[in-house]
Image (tube, rainbow, N blue to C red):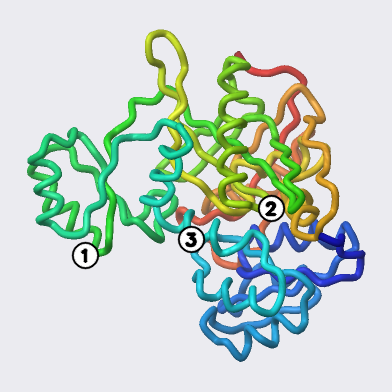
Amino acid sequence: MTALPPGSTIGILGGGQLGRMLAMAAARLGFRSHIYAPESDSPAFEVAAAHTIATYEDETQLAAFADAIDVATYEFENIPVATVEFLGRHVPVRPGAKALACAQDRLNEKTLARELGAMTAEFAAIDSFAALEKTLDSGFSIPSVLKTRRFGYDGKGQAKILTREDAREAWAAMRNAPSIIESFVDFRAEVSVVAARSADGTFAAFDVTENEHRDHILHRSLAPARLAPDVADEAIATAHKIAERLDYVGVFAIEFFVVNQDDRDRLFINEMAPRVHNSGHWTIDGAMTSQFEQHIRAVAGWPLGSTELKAAGAEMINLIGDDILAWQSLAAEPGVFFHHYGKKDVRPGRKMGHINRLLMEMPS
């Protein structure tokens, strides 16, 4: 593909903090950004050259959006596939609809992972309470977790089944949506690979990142993860296989559980995100190229940048809800890189910003 020159316009579907940071990275490279989102208070609007407020189903507005941009991308995976397919008939969209369709469905994700030889939790499709009962009666392991196949994140759209008696309540929580049941994975750590693939097949991964969650929301990321080198290499190789299979263009993330079996760490794929990822926010200050710049480079046809760490390690801590109110003390702390997402309303569980630190030595 021909590289887009500075001055070209990147269209971004979605106006949240990821779209905001993509637009900021694009501006640094000389690109204009045009944000398309239905929410009038989208924080990405503040840093973009243009924006459109419309639904993702409005084909008139989508066509006008396509006419105003040179390439399109998206900041989150709940964009309708039909929207990406419509835009793709007018302008290049990277990553394409194939990757989006896979990542939107947990059953597709798990099936692809198994096809590529990766390990996952045991799983089965569940489309009714009767199907759930039949699966449990056939010996599916308990405890387990029931999840909607689509539109779940940060712990939403899922219910635990700790005993057989929990099944009915768990299914009710799914609201009759197509679902998937997954066995519990007894993991010792959670890690992710944030990587990029360009249209010519060039692949580059950041250091594997170790993640700590609180209340189902990412709290802290540490790079590089405390893994044996061969296990980290395996995680990156698995991500590479997935990117190749999906003909992916852009930045994406693969989340893994680290399970100790026979005194050896083994990787189980949890899920895929076809976009820049919260666990990659440390790259803004901790890597030679941030994940946001890397994504813009990939979708614009530029060479991928270096993923090398700037220090021995890097740490990211999310600022959730009222955490953001400590902005003054955080901004005064030496060595802290403070990032505010520009959201007006502070709410419990809402990601309001994050801080990064460079580490001169890694914690044990």
> Where on the picture, by quarter, is residue 144?
top left
What residue sits right under mark 3 in the picture? 101
Q: Position of residue 265 (x, y in %)?
A: 47, 17
Q: Earlier in the sequence, mark 2 or mark 1?
A: 1
Give the quadrant of the N terminus.
Answer: bottom right
What residue appears at the point 54 percent right and 41 percent down from the top-left corner?
Answer: 254
**Which residue type does callout 3 highlight?**
Ala
- State the separation of the CA atoms marked 1 and 3: 21 Å
Secondary structure type for disc 3? helix
Q: Position of residue 125 (x, y in %)?
A: 26, 51
Say above or below: 86 vs 338. Answer: below
Q: Nearer the viewer, residue 137 or 113?
A: 113
Answer left or right for 293 relative to 80. right
**Which residue type does callout 1 highlight?**
Asn
Say above or below: 56 vs 205. Answer: below
Q: Nearer the viewer, residue 334 or 115?
A: 115
User: Label 2: few (<14), some or many (≥20) within 10 Å?
Assistant: many
Secondary structure type for disc 2? strand
Q: Earlier in the sequence, mark 1 or mark 3?
A: 3
What residue sits right under mark 1 in the picture? 176
Q: Which mark is residue 255?
A: none
Q: Nearer the viewer, residue 339 or 138?
A: 138
Say above or below: 327 vs 237. Answer: below
- State the separation of the CA atoms marked 2 and 3: 15 Å
Q: Earlier in the sequence, mark 2 or mark 3?
A: 3
User: Label 3: few (<14), some or many (≥20) within 10 Å?
Assistant: some
Q: Position of residue 38 (x, y in %)?
A: 56, 79
Q: Which mark is residue 250?
A: 2
Q: Does the residue at mark 2 contact the one at mark 3 (Cβ under 8 Å)?
A: no
Q: Nearer the viewer, mark 2 or mark 1?
A: 2
Give the quadrant of the C terminus.
Answer: top right
What residue appears at the point 25 percent right and 59 percent down from the top-left corner?
Answer: 174
